[in-house]
Amino acid sequence: MEPLKILIFVQDVPTIMASVGATRILKGCITMVRPGNCAMAAVAGLLAAVICSSSETVVDRAFEVVASMVVVVAFVGAGNSMNDFFDRELDRIAHPSRPIPLGIISPRTALMIAATLFAIAVGLSLTIGLESFLIVVTSLAFIVAYEVFLKSEGLAGNLAISWLTAALFLFGGAAVGGLELAWILAALAFMATLGREIVKDIQDVAGDERSRMTLPMRLGRRNAGIVASAALSVAVVLSPMPYLLSLLSAWYIPFLAVADTVFIYSAMIHFAAPEQGQKTIKTAMLIALVAFLVGGIA
């Protein structure tokens, strides 16, 4: 290599290293917010908007619908960043490949990213409407309380996670002025999520002994399982309401029957096989979402 070229290369090394470092940090930030989770949550919010309104309403309120999806992406990304901040010591053992344990992102940066994204979510929700703003602010209070106080408290943490899942559907409904149906959809999501969270705690009871006081640890695995089955049963009992109130068409019923059958099956098998039980509950929730979608569109 010619001396002049060598000199130019040496002079460019700091710039190249800075560029590589910046790219690495950017990739770390993207990994931390978990774009896959953000996208799935945004799609769920969109489905809630479609379910809770007519196609004409979705088109007429396209700005609100798109804005609500951006809010959901920002909120979920902020929540993931905040989770990485609070769990940074545990992640050194449980998830060493995450950006903070790897040293790509500092804890301070993670917290700043979370605060910025939460601010975007709250500010943008104001452009959608007062109901959307209140749902976002309430959810913000729940997610902060969960990370700071409730994560180690078992049932209280389960309730907070259940609210955050339900709020997603409330938010989608609020974007199109369809809270009447969104409340029912949110109630079903709340009870199903509560049942699944308790079953997950039953599955993880051995690993939680040092850091959390979960419901299975307080009541015993079987009694906690009964509570989980009761929550799933409430979801099944409430599930026909949208059709009985003429909010969804008859096409809702056959898909609902499949979802409720899977819920009931889950409520029985999780006592002997909690891992299979919580996965089956998730399947039932997806089928129920399809039931709502078909019943709302047909």
Image (tube, rainbow, N blue to C red):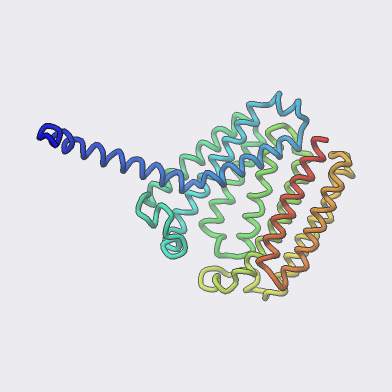
Give above or below for 141 relative to 126: below
The residue closer to the viewer here, 84 or 218, is 84
The residue under the point 66% across, 54% down is 162
The residue closer to the viewer here, 276 or 73, is 276
Disc tally is 0
Q: Quadrant of the N terminus?
A: top left
Q: Name the quadrant containing residue 234.
A: bottom right
Q: In which quarter of the image is the C terminus?
A: top right
Give above or below for 106 relative to 149: above
The residue under the point 69% across, 26% down is 61
Q: Name the quadrant containing residue 154.
A: bottom right
Residue farthest to the front? 1
Give above or below for 241 relative to 270: above
Give above or below for 24 relative to 7: below
The residue under the point 41% across, 47% down is 28
Task: Name the spot of residue 106 as percent of width and height, x first.
Answer: 36, 50
Task: Name the spot of residue 74 as percent of width and height, x first.
Answer: 53, 40
Task: Name the spot of residue 102 as percent of width and height, x first.
Answer: 37, 55
State left or right for residue 203 relative to residue 118. Answer: right
The residue under the point 62% across, 35% down is 68
